[in-house]
Image: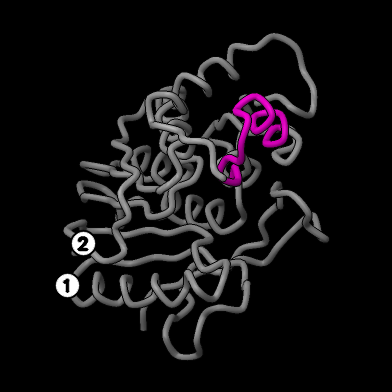
Amino acid sequence: MLAPVRNRTALADLEREIALPGTGLDRLRLMETPFVPEVRLHLAEDAIVWWARMEAAAGGRLPPPYWASAWAGGQALARYLLDHPELVAGRRVLDLAAGSGLVAIAAALAGADQVVANDIDPYAVAAVTVNARVNGVRVAATADDLLDSTVTADLLVAGDILYDAALARRVLPFLRRAADRGAVVLVGDPDRGHVPPGRLEVVASYPVPTTEPSVDSPVRRVQVLRPS
């Protein structure tokens, strides 16, 4: 069973991990994001090794540490926001499935009026907090499941959220509802095969360095998409 983790406990855990001396595959390290060097993130040298050590310490299973890698979809979307600040400046931004907070931080750097980063993993919420802090920006973080709610943001961003079919079936209607209410919706997707034909259109395409575990290529072609 999953070890119980509250947001405050997760934040204390990450702050302790960041402060640990030494180096190794089971450590977090502050580094520039490869495709978005304007943003620094606390990432794992090897997320799987770090995860194994944390689970051993917790005495149970913990959520997979997706926040501990800079996923290609998020890197592409963050790059797009920083290169097109006119899409962001003065707007209320919601970063869905925020992970490390990379896209949310990029939105804040690009001049957003308000940024909320959402992820159901308490460790991701903690990662957003520490990463926003080190980049000198203000990002609110929440762990609520928003997929059945109504979006009030002006700009909804989601990096690499369509990574399995079941999740895509929940996310795509949520994105459509947000767009129908007038939000600008942008998705970073490295073609994981869960985008139905005709539902999203391409606004940009990038070759993005891969840092996530178990990849077979050092670079992935990533598209920035919006509802068509």
Q: Which residues are magenta?
A: 50-65
Residue 217, picture quadrant:
bottom right
Tell whether 188 sits left or right of 45.
left
Residue of label 1: 181
Q: Residue furthest front?
A: 1
> Where residue 151 is drawn, which disc sits there?
2
Q: Position of residue 227 (x, y in %)?
A: 36, 78
Mark 1 near mark 2, Cβ–Cβ under 8 Å?
yes
- Tell me the amino acid under the disc marked 1: Arg
Crowding near pointer 1: few (<14 within 10 Å), some, many (20+)? few
Tell whether 121 sits left or right of 64.
left
Q: Position of residue 91 (x, y in %)?
A: 21, 50
Q: Residue furthest right?
A: 216
SS at mark 2? loop
Pick the residue in front: 124 or 93. 124
Tell whether 9 sits left or right of 71.
left
Q: Residue furthest top?
A: 21
Residue 28, picture quadrant:
top right
Q: Residue at x 32, y 35 (%)?
A: 139
Asked if residue 57 is among those painted magenta in the image, a careful observer would answer: yes
Instruction: Indicate the quadrant containing the N terminus: top left, top right, bottom left or bottom right.
Output: top right
Distance between mark 1 and mark 2 Cα atoms? 8 Å
SS at mark 1? loop
Q: First in sequence: mark 1 or mark 2?
A: 2
Q: Residue at x 18, y 64 (%)?
A: 150
Q: Position of residue 25 (x, y in %)?
A: 79, 29
Asked if residue 33 is among those painted magenta in the image, a careful observer would answer: no
